[in-house]
Image (cartoon, rainbow, N blue to C red):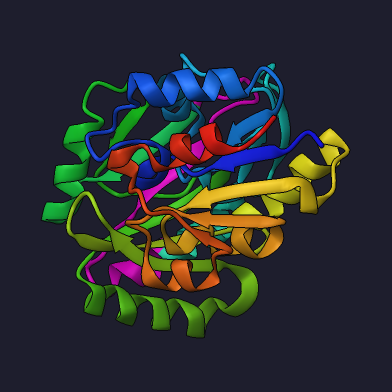
Amino acid sequence: MNTVFITDLDHTFLRSDLSISPYSERVWNAKAAHNTLTIATARSFKKSEQFVKNLHVNAPMILLDGSLIVSESRQIIERRCIDKELGDAVIDLGATLNSFPFVLALQDTDLNEAFLYPTQRNVYQHRLLQRYRDDDNLQEAAHIRAMKENFKLVYMGEEAMLQELYLRFREMFGDALKYILAPEAYMGCHFLTLLHPHADKAHGLECVSEYLGCHRSEMTVFGDNLNDLGMFEYAGTAVAVKNAHDVLKARADIVLEYSNDEDGVARYLEAQRG
């Protein structure tokens, strides 16, 4: 059976310094010669392409927490976006708590993305932007607003503040949005991500399954954080790296003895026959 392997990037396949080791690269590409390998990540198409440029990805990529599914030939298979009216309503409500989000949006069908960031931002947002300072899709907004098609709105900060924000959003918008509140390991804070209600990695796996004509039982997925829960529930085999969140480990079929910094995913791939 041709297994379909799908891995998260940050803190799962990527090392904590955002690198991919030569060993992981070599194992991935050898495995891709006889199997199907791709990624499922919270990152955008632009950033994901930078990370996987030396990897043989031979199935659609699940991007932006499942908001965007892109084929190997850079064609949009599906997108699930928050519309401008709802996005602006979210921003307005967040502003009452003096909180302003990053907005990741689609500019056109050629996969050009916008990363809008507020002038009024906290220390965590400021630090994150330093990682993206060389990207050409950054747009500062003194009065941030949503665009026509928004993949996600992301708030960063202390857990208590984001919990209050989550409760406000949930009360106001209910099931019109999907909400992910989880730790942000790079910054030592939390993030609250707002998505289309049907945008998640589980939905992404379903799209990939239909595209490839495979059954979910043939899928093996790797992850580390709470936004991976959906795909852990969907896939035939769910594998958590050693450094994964405890909640994810509890839902995993396999918990690796190696972390992302110890090439846990690659070690697992290399041990699989075929």
Residue 145 on image: x %, y %: 41, 50
Q: 231 or 149, which is in the foreground? A: 231
- Residue 153 figure quarter: bottom left
Is residue 150 placed above or below 20 in the rendered structure?
A: below
Quadrant of the frame with the C terminus: top right
Residue 190 on image: x %, y %: 27, 64
Q: Residue at image x 63%, y 39%?
A: 5
Q: Residue at image x 55%, y 76%?
A: 173
The answer to whether residue 248 is seen in the rendering is: yes
Residue 208 on image: x %, y %: 75, 40
Q: 131 or 151, which is in the foreground? A: 131
Was residue 95 drawn as part of the magenta stretch in this picture?
yes
* Position of residue 270 in the picture relative to residue 137 (left or right): right
In the displayed image of the protein, which residue is found farthest to the left? 123
Is residue 92 placed above or below 130 in the rendered structure?
A: below
- Report the magenta residues as a range: 91-112
* Position of residue 94 in the picture relative to residue 204 (left or right): left
- Residue 231 figure quarter: bottom right
* Position of residue 177 in the picture relative to residue 169 (left or right): right
